[in-house]
Image (spheres, coloured by chain):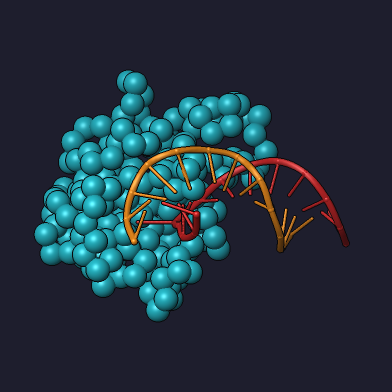
Chain colours: A cyan, B orange, C red
Amino acid sequence: MKKLDRAFYNRDSVIVAGELLGKVLVHQTEGQRISARITETEAYMGIEDKAAHSYGGRRTARVEVMYGEAGFSYIFMIYGMYYCFNIVTNERENPQAVLIRAVEPLEGIEQMAQRRFGKQYEQLTNSRKIGLANGPGKLCGALAIDRRINGMDLCGNEIYVEDAKCEDLRIVTSKRIGIDYAEEAKDYPWRFYIEGSKYVSVK
DNA sequence: ACGGGGATGGGCT
DNA sequence: GCCCATCCCCGTA
């Protein structure tokens, strides 16, 4: 399967967020290939978006990568324990990114179970099997994504997204999650997920 | 089934 | 010193 290229990422975040659904996120680590289908995303639209870390043109060391080329990873720590994985979009027009909020495990499921719960997959309850990677913090745990991945080029060979055929995939749109502080922006319909997928953070 | 609260640390004012 | 683009556990039913 073909890797998504820089031109794919170099568009408005809301466009990229929708089109990433059904594509396959791959992490090559320690000689292992871990992969998962993207089921849920959110667009963060940069300068005018009160929910975005780059709102109002804020430019600190943490968010600097969003001011650079599209197709790079932006990873931040949340609540002192979890990471969130984003892909920078819309190069040099606006410091935007897409948050990957949930994925469906494909390859490396045993490693995911081990990393998340320290158990074999078959030992897990059904809800933990489904919940291996259906949240932004969970998927970073399952796919071994942490600050070492921050600022990496997804056009490289360690972490990237593969194109995938997604026939008859329906997309649901909703408000974004966990941004109640963002005033009018909290209601913008910039969350996208695959209709009917079990591997989504909130139905 | 559901809801409340605790964990935990870096980034920014 | 306060705020988080979260997750999981443990209490009530």
x and y, in percent, of residue A12 in the image:
21, 65
Q: Looking at the image, which residue is at 46% across and 37% down?
A: A141
Q: Position of residue A16 (x, y in %)?
A: 26, 60
Q: Locate residue A63, reporting x and y percent.
A: 26, 52
Q: Is residue A127 left or right of residue A80?
A: right
Residue closest to the far top:
A31
Residue B3 horizontal side relative to residue A97, left or right: right
Q: How many marks?
A: 0
Q: In this view, does A146 lie above or below A102?
A: above
Front residue of A48 and B1? A48
Query: Quadrant location of the C terminus of chain A?
Result: bottom right
A135 or A93: nearer the viewer: A93
- As drawn, the residue found furthest toward the bottom would be A184
Q: Which residue is drawn at 63% across and 30% down?
A: A122
Residue A190 seen in the figure: yes
Q: Residue at x 38, y 36 (%)?
A: A145
- The quarter of the picture where the N terminus of chain A appears is top left
**Observer-nearest of A184 and A115:** A184
Does the rendering let one see residue A103? no
Residue A37 horizontal/vertical position (percent): 40, 46
- Residue A179 sits in which quadrant? bottom left
Q: Is residue A114 above or below residue A24?
A: above
Query: Residue at point 40% right, 79% down?
Result: A184
